[in-house]
């Protein structure tokens, strides 16, 4: 694909309905977590789903990297169908890696020797970490330089995306001054909306939209599931979880403690919503009838906790291509295994034990 293929005709062209048809096709919604470079795992999940002739996606909700993945997929679908979306996702992640390769944010030789992913011994990472603890981005990043913003602008025509009819897209951000979640729906989607959802406040200035300031959507909902309850007809929701809920040992080092605090913080909104979904499900199953306003969801989860719990916070800033491809392959394989085990459950029942996982 050309460097800006999505906007210059590198994809196949407008595609009114890219989804497979037929009685055997299973319709799902997607809920995509954020997590920086760890979002490459979600890229792998989407790659596997998009190549499947038995899966159609109605709605997508995402925060941070999940919002980026969702917006890229939606635009790719609208202009190039499922194959175009797969190509565009790969092109965007490749471009992110190419830009990172030109900076100091690279794993050191010691990082590469001690395991794929971390940058705990990388001078660039420690310089950025030190700067962000002493200065705000309004000081050390005065011009708000953000290569991800340039990459998304390069690959997505948001005017076309707002008219996308192939998938419903919801992107969440955190309203800084009001302390509440903001959901951007498809008709108000913009570069600013996606970047607001991915705005880490210790690296970038808050994104201003219509007089309001926004930070990363993961602080309030990672991801927010409720837009799918009210905005989509499909009852099956597949959560792509990249932030581990369970870990095997108690953190003891300063870095381990910070890493765990980060994952707990970014899972808090999800935990609350999953508890609410469990409560409503039990009410419905007991025969409670409120006139049909309550909606029973079939919840499903694809994750890789065994892999992701071993990755520290520094790896979320690691855009090394080998690392991104590794996460992609993990996500692809986990989704392939999940489809093999649970495809027949779609439309019938939940495959995620919410009480065991989130309560």
Image: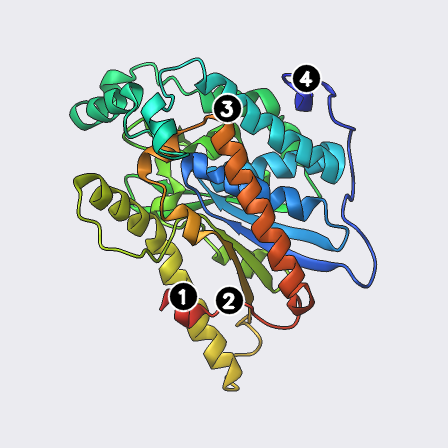
How many numbered discs?
4
Q: Is residue 185 visible?
A: no
Q: Is residue 246 above or below residue 201?
A: below
Residue that badge 4 annotates: 2
Q: Earlier in the sequence, mark 4 or mark 2?
A: 4
First reached walking from the N terminus: tag 4 or tag 1: 4
Disc 2 crowd, CA 10 A, few/some/many (<14, 14-19, 20+): some
Q: Is residue 263 left or right of residue 76?
A: left
Labels 3 and 1 touching (C-beta < 8 A): no
Q: Is residue 221 above or below residue 99?
A: below
Tell me the residue that label 2 is attached to.
352
Query: Distance between the Cα atoms at labels 3 and 1?
Result: 33 Å
Find the distance from the CA under tag 1 to the CA under tag 2.
Answer: 8 Å
Instruction: Tell me what residue is drawn at x 27 percent, y 43 percent.
Output: 259
The label on residue 96 is 3
Q: Circle 1: is it few (<14), some (14-19), or many (20+) Cα within 10 Å?
A: few
The percent coordinates of residue 25 (x first, y second) are: 76, 59
Q: What numbered label is drawn on residue 52?
A: none
- Residue contact at pointers 4 and 2, CB within 8 angstroms: no
Q: Badge 1 is on which residue?
A: 357
Is there CB contact under 8 Å for labels 1 and 2? Answer: yes
Q: Callout 1: helix, strand or loop?
A: helix
Image spot of residue 262 (x, y percent): 29, 44
Question: Residue at the right extreme?
Answer: 22
Q: Quadrant of the N terminus?
A: top right
């Amino acid at each position: 694909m050309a460097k800006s293929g999505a906007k210059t005709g590198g994809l196949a062209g407008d595609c009114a309905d890219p989804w497979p048809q037929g009685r055997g096709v299973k319709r799902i919604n997607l809920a995509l977590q954020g997590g920086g470079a760890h979002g490459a795992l979600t890229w792998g999940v989407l790659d596997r789903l998009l190549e499947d002739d038995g899966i159609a996606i109605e709605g997508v909700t995402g925060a941070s990297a999940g919002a980026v993945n969702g917006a890229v997929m939606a635009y790719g679908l609208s202009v190039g169908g499922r194959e175009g979306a797969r190509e565009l996702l790969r092109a965007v992640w490749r471009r992110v890696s190419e830009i990172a390769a030109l900076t100091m944010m690279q794993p050191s030789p010691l990082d590469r020797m001690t395991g794929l992913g971390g940058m705990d011994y990388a001078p660039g990472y420690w310089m950025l970490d030190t700067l962000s603890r002493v200065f705000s981005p309004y000081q050390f990043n005065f011009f708000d330089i953000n290569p991800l913003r340039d990459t998304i602008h390069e690959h997505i025509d948001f005017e076309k995306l707002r008219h996308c009819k192939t998938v419903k897209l919801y992107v969440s951000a955190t309203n800084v001054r009001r302390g509440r979640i903001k959901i951007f729906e498809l008709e108000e989607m913009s570069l600013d909306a996606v970047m607001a959802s991915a705005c880490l406040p210790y690296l970038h200035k808050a994104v201003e939209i219509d007089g309001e300031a926004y930070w990363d959507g993961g602080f309030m909902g990672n991801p927010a599931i409720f837009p799918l309850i009210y905005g989509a007809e499909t009852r099956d929701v597949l959560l792509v979880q990249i932030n581990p809920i369970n870990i095997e040992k108690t953190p003891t080092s300063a870095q381990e403690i910070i890493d765990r605090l980060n994952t707990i913080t970014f899972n808090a909104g999800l935990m609350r919503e999953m508890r609410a979904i469990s409560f409503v499900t039990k009410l419905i199953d007991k025969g409670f009838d409120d006139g049909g306003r309550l909606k029973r969801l079939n919840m499903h989860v694809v994750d890789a906790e065994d892999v992701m719990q071993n990755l520290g916070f520094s790896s979320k800033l690691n855009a090394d291509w080998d690392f991104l491809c590794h996460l992609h392959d993990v996500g692809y394989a986990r989704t392939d295994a999940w489809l093999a085990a649970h495809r027949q459950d779609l439309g019938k029942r939940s495959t995620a034990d919410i009480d065991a996982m989130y309560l």
